[in-house]
Amino acid sequence: MIWDPIRCIWVEATPEEGVRQKWIQRMIGELGFPKGLLAVEKDLASLPHRRLPSENDPHRRLDLLCFTPGITGLRPLLLVECKAGPISMAAERQALGYNDAVGAPFVCLVNRNGAKTLWREKGKIASVPFLPPYKKLVEKL
């Protein structure tokens, strides 16, 4: 079992959960992400701000979602998809598909070895091979 500091519960230590918990610790400890703005394993259907609700939403779960304060309340900033294995094009498509419903300006795919952060810039997908600190993502908005 492994402790999840966001949900405040013990969870099964699967390979993907190990990746998720490693990145939660790094995001909070090194990258300045506020713990209170992180949501873990949320059903798409439970998110009140989702852009494109569909009948498939109850079966789709996000690994990690970071919010940021906005004028009208919290808004999605970063969607994180955790993978036990390599970060593939299929994983990118999956994360971008989830983000079609969520509408976060940044999407990050992570595994044990690293991260890849994506965003739209001038009509194209831009990326960097790391996860920037929370402050940098907020500044880029």
Image (spheres, rainbow, N blue to C red):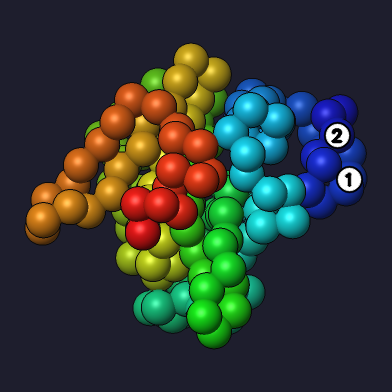
Q: Provide residue 85's location: percent of width, then percent of height.
A: 46, 22
User: What kind of residue is marked 2?
Assistant: Trp
Residue under the image location 62 percent in, 44 percent down: 33
Along the line of sight, the residue nearer the viewer: 112 or 129: 129
- Labelled pair 2, 1 in contact (Cβ < 8 Å): yes
Q: Which numbered tag is attached to residue 77?
A: none
Residue under the image location 89 percent in, 45 percent down: 9
Residue under the image location 58 percent in, 68 percent down: 69
Task: Classify 33 as above or below 83.
Answer: below
Tell which circle, 2 or 1, labels the residue nearer the N-terminal end: 2
Q: Quadrant of residue 141?
A: bottom left
Task: Classify 126 as above or below 99.
Answer: above
Q: Is residue 4 left or right of residue 140?
A: right
Q: Provide residue 91's location: percent of width, then percent of height.
A: 36, 39
Q: Which numbered tag is attached to residue 3?
A: 2
Along the line of sight, the residue nearer the viewer: 114 or 1: 114
- Residue furthest to the left: 123
- Mark 2 surroundings within 10 Å by alpha-carbon count, few (fewer than 14), some (14 through 19), many (20 or more): few
Report the quarter where the N terminus lies: top right
User: What kind of residue is marked 1?
Assistant: Ile
Report the label total. 2
| One can see residue 78 in this view | yes
Q: Is residue 141 left or right of residue 85?
A: left
Residue corresponding to mark 1? 9
Q: CA distance from mark 2 to mark 1?
A: 6 Å
Q: Secondary structure at mark 1?
A: strand
